[in-house]
Amino acid sequence: MPPKSNKLSLTVPNPPLNTPALDDPELCYSYEIARGEMGVLSFEPYKSLILPYWAFRTVPIAQNSAEVLWAIFESYIERGDFVGADMTRKYIQMGMTRAKRYANHKGGRKYGADGKQLEKWSGDDADGKRKEKEDASELFKGYWRRCTSDEEYLELKKQWQKEKEQYQPKS
């Protein structure tokens, strides 16, 4: 097996990613806004569209991933696709939380096979892996804050919530 590379070069998709929720009201309003990044790994087809752009192994990889995800977020906002924008926001948030978990728990595992919470890392960080994951988490955190405070995103969210309340699926 070849060694893992610290280089990953993601580019902003061109043409932009599809906007399936704009063409399918049933898909659009079946989406749920949940706490944290719940549902991010199960809501298709957005999962398959966005997941390939999510990575956090090193700070340069996290930086590249966060920049590309931010561009995807902006593209969804520009086209009025709240579901796509919110899913992208969730991946950015997941970059922050997963990198933080690796900074706090060696191997990134919070719970053992027995279901009990594992101890957090202690001692020195001679190889710098904890610091690298902490820095990657902080990087994603900045982009996540940009997403959650974006006025167009907040307006799309409000509009989507109102429309979802009124949506009546075809029977």
Image: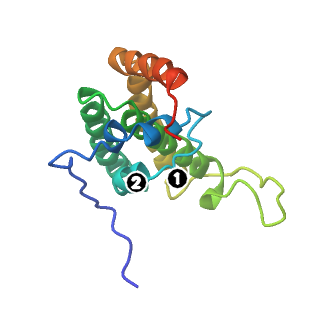
Residue under numbered circle 1: 41
Measured Cα–Cα span from mark 1 to mark 2: 8 Å
| Residue at which label 2 appears | 51
Q: Residue at x 67, y 58 (%)?
A: 109
Where's residue 135, x and y in %?
Answer: 45, 41
At 56% from the left edge and 40% from the top edge, which residue is drawn? 37
- Specify whether 41 is left or right of 80: right
Q: Residue furthest bottom?
A: 1
Mark 1 in CB contact with mark 2 (< 8 angstroms): yes
In which quarter of the view is residue 5 placed? bottom left
Q: Pick whichever, 108 or 40, lies toward us.
A: 40
Coordinates of residue 41 in the picture (x, y in percent): 52, 52
**In the picture provided, is 9 more to the left or to the right than 4?**
left
Name which quarter of the figure residue 38 lies in. Answer: top right
| Amino acid marked by disc 1 | Leu
| Mark 1 burial class by Cα count in 10 Å: few <14, some 14-19, many 20+ | some
Give the residue type at disc 2: Leu
